[in-house]
């Protein structure tokens, strides 16, 4: 038989990763219209500077810790997603908020800023693979399963900041709250005061680490709900008996770290302190010395004594920057192979220059707009988090 090679059709996800086409069901958005400057243009830095200067106080640039250095150098403030959204809200005079981060973060900034402020994401294909693992239709299907089983009324949804505005809105409508990695324990404790079961979205690892390590539940109290399977892949009895239903989602960056990485680095680096993000698997977190959000990781390393050695389990751009900023300490990446967040890395200098120059020319490009109803209920869920007792929530 003579074979004819059939060119494979690119999948929608592959096209999105290439910055092409759109997927209305994904938290990613649409392709960039217009021509981008060439990455090889030697004037990119000067062009970004000139555009920033021309926009003056009308512009406020936010840079997430996981962004490339070439972009971070133009950020007016750097931080984690929640801190950056709060910073945007604290700058009402800024007409344009350029968010160098990923799609769900820009949505949160739009929710927390005034209607007059325009939030811009330099590349609409900068999504988050974890946020994309919980689509609103799937979550509504899950809720229908819980209703049929008779547990929806006593189940409180908690969604991590790393989720689409639609999921935050669903959470707000159904009596739940948003959480960050630093207040997940308080959010889950609060949820168990409101009901007797928690649906934790979309990161199963943060949910499990919080339930077991912080709240003292057993691993058996947690079941994983797989949205691609009938009934989430669970029996009605499993759903009824579970205390925490963990959505089957994870971060593709933090999911790379394994317990073996921890064993290996302890052999390679004498007296190393292993610090990891709670989006890592339970087995990794159990073996680490410290667990914390990006802001906690930064603070721990900055305040550590000179000469100390650290293995860091989080995104590589941040780890490289920490190593540069702390030359008196030994800082190594927890995994031996390189891993950036590919969607965070989509925001590069050409996209930043393209969006800034368009703003100078009076064209608002790549604006992130959350519709009023979604915005209202997402804000309800965010406000519930802000009202949680204890220190000011932030940091993921
Ligand atoms: S590091 Fe993970 S959670 Fe953060 S934006 Fe990238 S894929 Fe999403």
Image (cartoon, rainbow, N blue to C red):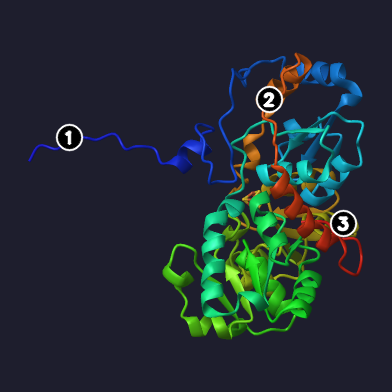
> From where the camera sits, is residue 164 visible?
no
Give the mark toward the camera: 2 or 3: 2
- Cα distance, mark 3 to mark 1? 58 Å
Q: Nearer the viewer, residue 122 or 286?
A: 122
- Cα distance, mark 2 to mark 1? 43 Å
Give the mark toward the camera: 3 or 1: 1
Is disc 3's CB within 8 Å of ligand 1? no
Q: Which residue is mark 3?
A: 299
> Going 73% across and 67% down the picture, which residue do you hit?
175
Q: Callout 1: helix, strand or loop?
A: loop
* Quadrant holding the C terminus: bottom right
- Cα distance, mark 2 to mark 3? 36 Å
> From where the camera sits, is residue 198 visible?
yes
Q: Position of residue 54 (x, y in %)?
A: 85, 16
* Quadrant holding the N terminus: top left
Query: Up-down: is 256 above or below 321?
Result: below
Q: Residues within 10 Å of mark 2 (few under 14, many from 20)?
A: many
> Going 81% across and 66% down the picture, which residue do you hit?
183
């Amino acid at each position: 038989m003579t074979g004819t090679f059939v060119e494979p059709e690119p999948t929608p996800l592959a096209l999105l990763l290439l910055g092409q086409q759109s997927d209305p069901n994904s938290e990613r958005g649409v392709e960039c219209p217009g021509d981008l400057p060439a990455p090889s243009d030697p004037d990119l830095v000067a062009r970004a500077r000139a555009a920033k200067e021309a926009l003056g106080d009308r512009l406020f640039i936010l840079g997430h810790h996981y962004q490339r250095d070439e972009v971070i150098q133009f950020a007016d403030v750097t931080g984690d997603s929640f801190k950056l959204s709060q910073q945007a809200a604290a700058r009402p005079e800024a007409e344009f908020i350029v968010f160098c981060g990923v799609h769900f973060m820009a949505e949160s900034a739009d929710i927390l800023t005034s209607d007059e402020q325009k939030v811009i994401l330099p590349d609409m294909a900068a999504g988050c693979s974890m946020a994309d693992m919980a689509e609103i239709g799937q979550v509504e299907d899950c809720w229908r399963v819980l209703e049929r089983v008779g547990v929806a009324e006593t189940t409180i949804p908690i969604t991590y900041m790393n989720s689409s505005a639609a999921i935050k809105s669903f959470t707000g409508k159904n009596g739940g709250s948003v959480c960050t990695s630093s207040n997940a324990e308080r959010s889950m404790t609060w949820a168990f005061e409101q009901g007797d079961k928690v649906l934790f979205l979309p990161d199963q690892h943060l949910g499990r680490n919080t339930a077991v390590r912080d709240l003292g539940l057993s691993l058996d109290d947690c079941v994983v709900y797989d949205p691609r399977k009938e009934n989430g892949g669970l029996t009605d009895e499993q759903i009824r008996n579970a205390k925490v239903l963990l959505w089957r989602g994870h971060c593709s960056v933090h999911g790379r770290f394994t317990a073996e990485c921890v064993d290996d680095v302890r052999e390679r680096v004498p007296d190393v302190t292993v610090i990891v993000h709670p989006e890592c698997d339970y087995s990794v977190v159990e073996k680490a010395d410290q667990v914390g959000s990006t802001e906690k990781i930064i603070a721990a390393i900055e305040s550590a004594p000179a000469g100390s050695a650290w293995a860091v389990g989080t995104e590589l751009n941040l780890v490289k920057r920490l190593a540069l900023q702390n030359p008196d300490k030994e800082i190594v990446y927890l995994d031996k192979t390189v891993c950036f967040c590919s969607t965070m890395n989509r925001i590069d200098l050409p996209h930043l220059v393209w969006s800034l120059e368009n703003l100078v020319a009076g064209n608002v490009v790549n604006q992130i707009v959350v519709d009023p109803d979604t915005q209202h209920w997402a804000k309800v869920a965010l406000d519930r988090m802000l009202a949680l007792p204890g220190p000011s929530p932030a940091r993921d």
